[in-house]
Each structure stands twice: as structure tokens, then as C-alpha cells.
Image (cartoon, rainbow, N blue to C red):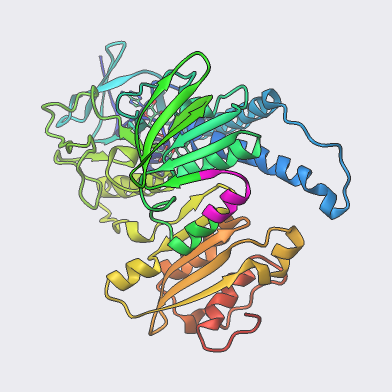
Amino acid sequence: MTERFDLVVLGGGPGGYAAALYGAAAGLRVALVEEQRVGGTCLHRGCIPAKELLQTAEVLRTVTGAARFGVVVEPPTLDLAVALERQQQVVDRLTKGLETLLRGREVTVFPQRGVVADAAAHRVRLDDGTEVEGRGLVLATGSAPRAFPGLAFDGVRVLSSDHVLRLGEVPARTVIIGGGAIGCEFASYLADVGSRVTVLEALPGILPGVDPEAAAIVGRLFKRRRITVHTGASVEGATTGEDGVVVRATVDAAPLEVEADVVVVSIGRTPRTAGIGLEGSGVVVDPRGHIEVDAAMRTAVPRVYAVGDVVDSPALAHVAFAEAMVAVRDLLGEDPQPIDYGRVPWGIYCHPEVAFCGLTEEAARAAGHEVVTSVHRFAGNSRAQIMQEADGLVKVVATAGGVLLGVHIVGPWATEQLGAGYLAVNWEATVADLAPLVQPHPTLGELFGESVLALTGRALHG
Ligand code: FAD
């Protein structure tokens, strides 16, 4: 039996559910095929459960440091079972909300695995043999954790991000392979809840892509919290046993062995494009498994789109949302504006948080700009002092003519602070546009205003 729709979406994560919701909001009849609960990696195995655990870590840190505020509490202990229960409640509430939203927009959700039966006909075959066909098809099957070569995930000693989010006990010692965003978030969480953490990063610094000045602050504060970071570490392998795991690496040409209870592999993700019917479909998949698309998210087959982690763009939920909207608008013939990937916002929720958008100082110079920068530290910000969270900085990168190119924040609630900088960079605002704007006092956001003001040559506080 073939059911007909305007739009068929394969995969119900942020890319897929955004395509379904946005398409339905535009009046399309939409079929959404999802083999698990809707929400995808982000809601069930990524952004939300990870940030929820980081929030638990923050509560623990706050209570541990409460005496400095004159609030005397018993030394706090962590009940991870309660924390995990709360994590699941948050996930369940959000999932129910999403399901209600989809129902409200009359999206037909097929809770089954689907494969592309005929790409040119925009037809997907479900496990029960039903076929769904549309005028357009959006592929949004997402990604899965990438294993380290020769070191299969076992969920006991060798953990993926999926396993870390469900850990029922805090491992006494953890090795994390990979010091990117997810690796650093896990390092921060596990250290806060009492694990002795070692991060092994192959590149010369942690958090590749982050402004080096900001990344260095994270590295310094990690060290203060007894997180050991080895950069330039080439991991060769690991041996698991009854008592733990030994990870072998070479650091600066010297051999290194680290013993731990668990090793967390956080070296990126693999697009889920194998086994979904793309072979011989006309949809082109690159050697790394990503589906090739143009700026309107179009694959090589007319009106077949791909969005989210299956394409080679920043693997972020909000990028998947944006790509989904571009795809739907193209299907509707609306000539959507392509996404400017160089200016999407990034948020990293370790302690201290990092958030940025646009060019780093280095990248701006490499792109040929004559660059000016303004750096202001939270040590001089009253709200940060009140919060006892005064480590970190705001760095504004602009052209010599005053056009903002990049905003980089490391420090308290950096991910919530980025909004103003994000708008400024994407609106191509100038220092002259922004400097007269009034910032509320006392707020963390004043530091962005101050950093811009300083580029007029006359600062107030810094
Ligand atoms: P996914 O979310 O992977 O969804 C794909 C869906 O397709 C899944 O539900 C899957 O079950 C379904 N599916 C696959 N194949 C089939 C099939 N054949 N039939 C039916 N259904 C199928 N991003 C952020 O922006 N901010 C963060 O803070 C953040 N934190 C993260 C933390 C962790 C630990 C991880 C792992 C990721 C994090 N991400 C974060 C990344 C974010 O989760 C992904 O970029 C996002 O989920 C990608 O959305 P997607 O729709 O492309 O794919």
C-alpha cells in the first residue's frame, strides 16, 4: 500500500522534525518516519541529557562552594540515581511536547524504520511493507558515535557518549580520547562529580576551532580542577581487563600509559547513510559517508534533500533546524537564503562555558582582513564578581573599519550571553552602530558592550 503526502521525512531528530514542523506550518501534508521516539540524538542521547547532567554538576559545585556566600550546608553528596531520574523526566517532558506539537500540526508519524525505495519518486518503504510517497523527500537519518579503530564500544570499559549519559556510577578514573566540545563537556561533568579525568587530544590544543585565547582559559581552569590534559597525544590503542583499561599513547615522542576504570571515546560521529537505500538511488554519498548537497540542501536527485548530521556541515542541532527550513523553502519554490556556516553560533557547556560566532582573530587575518581586537575579562565585571565566577573573557574581532567579524566568550553563562554578539556579527553591525547602545547594569552582558566600546578608543571600565 502506498500513502501519499506532500513531504516525506526520513528520521525524526532535529533535522527531520524541524522539516516536518516547518513544512506542516506552511500547509504541507507531512509524513515523518522515525524508528525510535521522535527527538533524535539531540533529545535522547546528546544535547539535552548531556546539558542536564552538566546542570547537576553545576548545582553540586554551587552547593560545595556555598560556604563562601555564608550559606553553611553539610558536605553535599551526589545521588546519581536521582540525577538520572530527573534527566529522564526532562527528556520525557520535552519528547511529549514535541509529539504534541507534531500532532497539533497534523504530521503523520510512522514509528518504524524506513529505507528509500525509490528516490526519484520520493518513496520510502517502512518495515511493515507500507510505502509513503511525497512530492519531496528530506533525508535526516543523523549520525552515530564513531569508534576508535580496534577498540569496539562495550558499554563497560569502552564507552561512547550514549553510555556516558547513562552511567549509573561515577568511575574513579576516566580517560577521554578527544578534547573537542563533547569530550570537554564530559571531562567537566565527570570531574565535577568526582572522577579523576585525563583527556588525550591529538591536536596541539583542546577545543579545536575555538579562539586559542578562549581555549587556553578552559585548559587553565581544567588544570585547576585536576583534569589532566595531554595535547599532541597520539592514541595507539587500549587494553581492557577485569580491573579496568590501560590506554596507550605517544605524547611528544614519549610513550604514555594511562590506567583508568573506563575510556570514553569522543572522536566525532559517523553519518548514518549506510543501509538506508541510497546505493544506486542517484543520491551521492562522499567517501566519509556524508550526503552531498548544494546550498539549498538539494541532493543530486530532484526534490530529494538532506539535512543535519548526514551532511558535511557543523554537527549542531540548530544548524539541522536551519537546514531543514532551507530545504522546505526550496521545495516550496521560495528561493531560500543559504546558511552562512561561518557565522552560526557555537556553544560548549563545560565549566567554564564557551560560546562564539564568526571569525577568530587568526582566521580573520588569514582571510586578509586588517584586524582589531578588544579583550575584556570577567574579573572586571561586577555581576561575575557577585556570582564568584570571574574567570574568562569576551573577545571582539573587528575589521580596522569597525565591522564586527567575530565574538568569542568564555566564562559564566557564555552560551546565554552570545545572543547580542551573534546578532551583531550576522547583521554586520559596526562598532559605531553598537557603541551607543546601553547595557543593563549589573549584568554579565555588559562585558560585550564594554569590549565594543573600547574599540572606539574610549573605554569606560576597561
Ligand atoms: P539525529 O539527531 O541523529 O536524528 C536522526 C534520527 O533519525 C534518529 O532519531 C534516528 O533514530 C532516525 N533514523 C535513522 N535512520 C532511520 C531509519 N532508517 N528509519 C527511521 N528512522 C531513522 N548539538 C547542539 O547544537 N548543541 C549541543 O549542546 C549538542 N550537544 C551534544 C552532545 C552530545 C553528547 C552529542 C552526541 C551531540 C550533541 N549535539 C549538540 C549534536 C546534535 O545532537 C546533532 O547535531 C543533532 O542531533 C543532529 O540532528 P539530526 O536530525 O541530523 O540527527
Q: Quadrant of the N terminus?
A: top left
Q: Which residue is located at x 47 percent, y 67 percent?
A: 407
Characterize the magenta stretch by its predominant secondary structure: helix
| Viewer-proximal residue among 446 and 120 | 446
Q: Which residue is located at x 77 percent, y 48 percent?
A: 65
Q: Which residues are magenta?
A: 219-228
| Viewer-proximal residue among 91 and 129 | 91
Q: In this picture, is 349 found above or below 92?
A: below
Q: Is residue 274 left or right of residue 242?
A: left
Q: Which quadrant of the figure has residue 293? A: top left
Query: Can see residue 110?
Result: no
Q: Is residue 144 left or right of residue 366?
A: right
Q: Which quadrant of the figure has residue 85? A: top right
Q: In this picture, is 141 found above or below 125?
A: below
Q: Which residue is located at x 16 percent, y 29 percent?
A: 121
Magenta-span inclusion, residue 223 = yes
Query: Can see residue 292?
Result: yes
Q: Is residue 50 left or right of residue 139?
A: right
Q: Position of residue 182 (x, y in %)?
A: 47, 41
Q: Which residue is located at x 28 percent, y 47 percent?
A: 332
Q: Quadrant of the C terminus?
A: bottom right
Q: In this picture, is 458 found above or below 328?
A: below
